[in-house]
Image: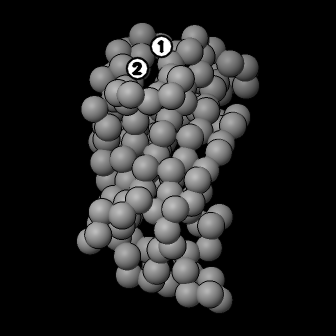
Amino acid sequence: MPFRCRIPIRFGDIDQAGIAYYPTLFDHTHTAFEEFWEHGVGVSYPHLLLKDKLGFPLVHMEADFRSPLRFGDILSVEVAVTHLGRSSVTFRYRAYVSRTRKLSFEVHSTTVCLDMDSFKSTPLPQKYRRILERHRATGSRP
């Protein structure tokens, strides 16, 4: 089941054309990623990094932009897991304008589970794998 969070489009997100500047949308996916860990998995991302010594750096990202966002819009972002590898996780972010439910953008990002002490990939711990399995997308691409 996808995790959901809400992210407001702020004044600083907007470009000269009056719509959200696309790099800020990637920043919003990372905000949703951190919210997912804290509220969907049950551990804050700072705890994961500093206490568990695990990071999930981005190794691949692709996006499709569907409709513009404007100042004052509220994004409803759905975060789902589309692939679990030995040490990789692929996330899908679908961002909708809350008031219209119109799809604004979809992002697929692949991260690798990283041992923060050695900076080398490490197998995804079973306790997190089990939780991530619960957030698997249905009917998603591999």
Vertical placement of residue 122 versus 55, above or below: above
**Residue 64: assigned label:** none
User: Could you tell me which secondary element the residue under label 2 belongs to?
Assistant: helix
Q: Residue at x 61, y 50 (%)?
A: 63
Rendered image quadrant of residue 56: top right
Q: To which quarter of the image does residue 108 belong?
A: top right
Q: Is residue 92 left or right of residue 134?
A: right
Distance CA(mark 2)–CA(mark 1):
6 Å
Q: Tell me, yes or no, whether the two marked residues, 2 and 1, touch with CB atoms within 8 Å.
A: yes
Q: Image quarter for residue 137?
A: top left
**Residue 34 position within the rendered picture, expressed as x and y whole percent measured from the top left:** 45, 46
Instruction: Bin the neighbour count of mark 1 within 10 Å (Cα to Cα): few under 14, some 14-19, many 20 and up.
Output: few
Residue 35 shows up from this direction: no
Q: Is residue 58 above or below residue 131?
A: below
Q: Which element type, helix, strand or loop, lies under badge 1?
A: loop
Residue 90 location (% of width, % of height):
54, 30
For image coordinates 38% across by 28% down, the residue present is: 139
Instruction: Please state the horizontal and vertical placement of residue 4, each as a whole percent of the image.
Output: 30, 48
User: Which amino acid does the dot numbered 1 rest on?
Assistant: Pro
Q: Amino acid at mark 2?
A: Tyr
Query: What residue is shown at x 36% (from left), y 47% (from top)?
Result: 78
Which residue bears the numbered disc 2? 128
Numbered circle sitting on residue 125: 1
- In this rendering, does residue 129 appear at all? yes
Of residues 53 and 96, the one drawn nearer to the viewer in this rendering:
96
